Structure formats: structure tokens, C-alpha cells
Amino acid sequence: MNARVLTVALVAFLGGQTSFAADGDVTGLFSTFARGEKSGDVSGAEIHIVPNPKGYSAIVQGSEGAPGFPEVVDVVVKGITLVFTIPVESASGFSPGIYNGTVTKEGLRLRGPRGLYGDYFLPRKRSFWQ
């Protein structure tokens, strides 16, 4: 429970620090979250890549109607490419498995397990939650 509260606080704090970085910088906020006009449901995904003392982390959250729990995962970065794993027990809204991404100043091209986020583009933009 405390880890989830910390994650939500971290997302709120870092969400205000949107980075429109040049090519070569993988940090930033990438989002496709949108609210359905009729249903009010939230759909899409949001990923915030941030530096940490050992490299990088991502705060990930997916939604198909109701948002999942934000989850912090380790990210391996090489140049403008990145890899992270969503664990089997995740409630983030992302399917468990390995995700590969390529970051540009326009956004994040994500390739993951079959399903909604199998081949997905998230533009750089402010957090949906702001």
C-alpha cells in the first residue's frame, strides 16, 4: 500500500516536469490517455521515463476503461532504445512481458507482447492527470 501511495505521489510530482528533449534523451512523459466523450472511461497508456541512481525507471499505467495502478519498473537504456519488463502480478493495465521502445523527440514507439500495446505510439505530452 505504501509503495502505491509513493508511486502516485512520484507521478504527480514528476508529471509537472514534462521534458521535450532532443533526440538521444530517453527521459520524458509519453501519453495517449483520453476520456471517452459518452462513457467517461479512460483509455490509453502513460509512461514516464525518469533517471535514478542506477540508470532509469519508468512509471507505467494503462487503461481500458478504468486505469490500472501506476507501477515503477526498471528500464535498460542503450542510446535511444529501451527495454522494460511488466511482471506477471502487475495491476498496471499493461500485459505482463517484455517491452522494447525507441524514443524520439516526438514520442515513444513501444513494442510489447501481443495485445493492445503490441505496436503502440505514445507522443510526448503533459500527463493526462494534470
Image (spheres, rainbow, N blue to C red):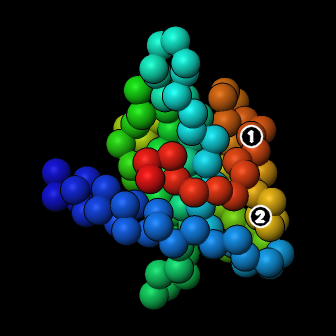
| Foreground of the two, 54 or 46 | 46
Q: Quadrant of residue 8?
A: bottom left
Q: Which residue is mark 2?
A: 103
Q: Where does the image place residue 103, in percent across and percent down from the top left?
A: 77, 64
* Residue 103 placement, left or right of 90: right
Q: Are marks 1 and 2 in contact (CB under 8 Å)?
A: no
Residue 44, located in which quarter of the rendered image? top right
Q: Residues within 10 Å of mark 1 (few under 14, many from 20)?
A: some
Mark seen at residue 120: 1
Vertical side of 114 occupied by 32: above or below = below
Residue 110 in sight: no
Q: Position of residue 31 (x, y in %)?
A: 61, 48
80 left or right, relative to 27:
right
Q: Residue at x 47, y 13 (%)?
A: 39
Image spot of residue 123 (x, y percent): 72, 51
User: What is the C-alpha distance between the residues marked 1 and 2?
Assistant: 12 Å
Between residue 129 and residue 89, name the one nearer to us. Answer: 129
Q: In the image, 52: left or right of 4?
A: right
- Residue 9 versus residue 126: which sits nearer the camera? 126
User: Which amino acid, by three-letter code, is at mark 1?
Assistant: Tyr
Whole-percent x, y for residue 68 in the image: 40, 36
Q: State the residue at coordinates (70%, 71%).
A: 20
Q: Residue at x 51, y 38 (%)?
A: 62
Disc 2 marks a residue whose amino acid type is: Val
Residue at horizontal 54%, vertical 61%?
Answer: 48
Q: Identify the element where label 1 is drawn.
A: strand
Say if 24 sits above or below 122 in the image: below
